Amino acid sequence: MNFLTARVDLIQRLLGLAALGTLLIGLGLVFTAPVDFQQGDSVRILYAHVSSAKMALLCYVALTICAIGVLWKKSEGADAAMEALAVVGACFTAVTLVTGAIWGKPMWGTWWAWDARLTSMLVLLIIYVGLVALRSSLDNPQKAAKATAVLAIIGAVDLPIIHFSVVWWRTLHQPAMFKGNGMITMAPEMRLPLAVMAIAFILMGAYMTLIKTRAIRAQRRLDALEDEALALEAESDHA
Amino acid sequence: MLRAAYRIAWKDVVGDLRRRATLSSMLFFSLSVLVIFQAGLEPNRSEALKLMPGLLWITLLFTSLVGLGRVFQAEEEDGALEGLLLSPMPRGVIFLGKWLGNLVLTALVALLLLPLMLILLNVDAWGALHLIIGVVLLGILGLTGLGVLLAAMTQAARARETLLALLLIPLVSPLLIAAVQATNGVLGLTTEIAAWIRLMLVFDVVYLAMAPWAFGWFVED
C-alpha cells in the first residue's frame, strides 16, 4: 500500500499547489495579453481551449503506456492509473469541445461544424467514455483490466486512422473551415501566456490523475475488504 | 491449424442455419430498419439514390450489432468457451474461426439485403450491383473483425449489447466513412473511389492482423 503513504500525500499537495500557482499566473497573463485585432476578447478562451486539447491527447498517450504496463507487467497500479486517465482525459476532451463551441458561436456563427478536428475530438470523447464503461461493467477485476487495456491499445491504433479518415472526408468535399486555427502565425505576445497555460494544464492533469488513481485504489481495496468480510460472515453463520 | 478455424466457423454457420436463429433475426431486423428509414425520410427517386450509400451502411452496422451480440452466446451458455480454450491450438486460430463464422452470416445477410434495398427504396443501381457487393464485402471484413473481438471482450459484461455498440461505433467510424464514400463513388455520385478503397484496405489489414493477438491477450490467464 505504498500508494497511500505520507510521501505520496506530500507529492500530491505540492503538485496541487504548483498547478494552482501556475494556473493563477497563466490566467493573469491571459487577461493582460493584448486582444486580437479581429477576434476581440473572445480570443482569450483559446488559451484554455488549446491547452485542454493538448491534454486530451496527452492523456491518451499516457493511457496507452499504462495499458502496455497492464498487459506486460500485469501491474495493478497501471490499471488504476489507466481508469483515472480515461476519466481525466474525458474531462479535458469535453472542456475542449465546450470551449470550442463557445468560441465558435461568435466567430463562425455556429456552435458546431462537422469539421475534421471537431469530429475526431467527438469520437475521442466517445472512446474515453467507452473505456470507462467497459472497465466498470466487468465483474472480474483481472478480466476488466485486461479488456480495458486491449481496448485502449485498439483505440491508440485507431485514433490516427480516425483522424486521417475524417480529415480526408471533410476536405474532399469542401475546403477546411480553418487551418491550424491561426496559432502558427500567432503574435509573440500571445506565446508566453499560452505556454504558461499549457504547463498549468499539464500540472492540473497530473494532479487530477494522481487523486483519481488513489481514490480508485482505495475504492478497490475497500471492495476487496468488504468481500472478505462477507465471506467471513457467511463462514461464521455456517458454523 | 487453419482447418481448426474452418471447423469452428463451420460449426457456427451450420448450427445457426439449422436453428435459423441469428441469420433470420439479422435479416428481419435489417428489413425493419429499411421500413423505418422509408417512413422517416420518405425519399423520392433521386433522393433515394443519394441517401442509399448512407442508409446501406447504417443498416449493415446495426444489423451486424444484432449478429455480434450472439457470436459468443453458445459458448457462454454451455461454458463451451473453456472447452475451446483448452483445445491445443493457438488462441488466434480460435478467433479466426469465430470471425469466419460471423463473416459468412453477415455476408449472407448483406447479399440478401442489397437487392431488397434496391427494390424497396426504388433505386435503379442494378448495373453497379456487383461493384456495390465488392465494396460491401470489403467493408464487412473489417467490421466483423473488430466486432467479433469487441464481442469477445464484452461477452461477460453487464449490459453487453449497449456496451458493444458504444465501443464498436466510434472505433469503426473510419471504415464506415470510407465505405459510404466508396459506395458513393461506385454509384457515380462522386469520382473519388480509389482513395477510399485504399483506406478500407488499410483498416481491414490493420484489424485482421491485430485482432487475433488482442484476442489472445484477452483470453489468456
Image: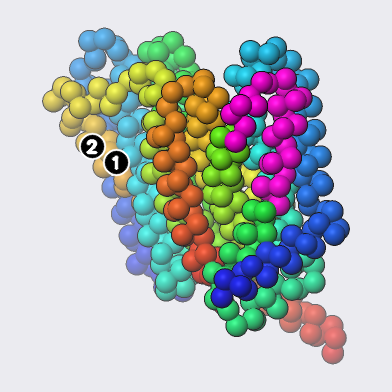
Residue B203: percent from the left, percent from the top?
A: 46, 47
- Going 65% across and 63% down the picture, which residue do you hit? B98
Amino acid beneath label 1:
Ala
Residue B93 counted in the magenta span: no
Which numbered tag is attached to residue B111? none
Q: How is the image coloured?
A: rainbow
Q: Which is nearer the eye, A124 or A29? A: A124
Instruction: Tell me if label 2 and label 1 are in contact, CB under 8 Å.
Output: yes
- Going 71% across and 65% down the picture, which residue do you hit? B10
- Position of B178 relative to B145 (above/below): above
Rendered image quadrant of residue A6: bottom left
- Going 64% across and 50% down the picture, which residue do you hit? B164
**Mark 2 element type:** helix
How many neighbours does mark 1 have within 10 angstroms: few (below 14), some (14-19), or many (20 or more)?
many
Q: Which is nearer the eye, B143 or A62? A: B143
Rendered image quadrant of residue A102: top left
Of all residues, the one furthest to the bottom in this rendering is A239
- Position of B153 relative to B196 (above/below): below
Q: CA distance from mark 2 to mark 1?
A: 6 Å
Residue B106 counted in the magenta span: yes
| Side (left or right) of B190 relative to A204 | right
Secondary structure character of the magenta stretch overall: helix
Q: Which is nearer the eye, B99 or A227? A: B99
Q: Which residues are magenta?
A: B105-130
Do callouts 2 and 1 point to residues on the same chain?
A: yes
Chain where mark 2 sits: A
Residue B120 visible to the viewer:
yes
Query: Where is mark 2, residue-wise?
Result: A196
Query: Where is mark 1, residue-wise?
Result: A200
How many neighbours does mark 2 have within 10 angstroms: few (below 14), some (14-19), or many (20 or more)?
many
| Side (left or right) of A37 relative to B176 | left
Chain where mark 1 sits: A
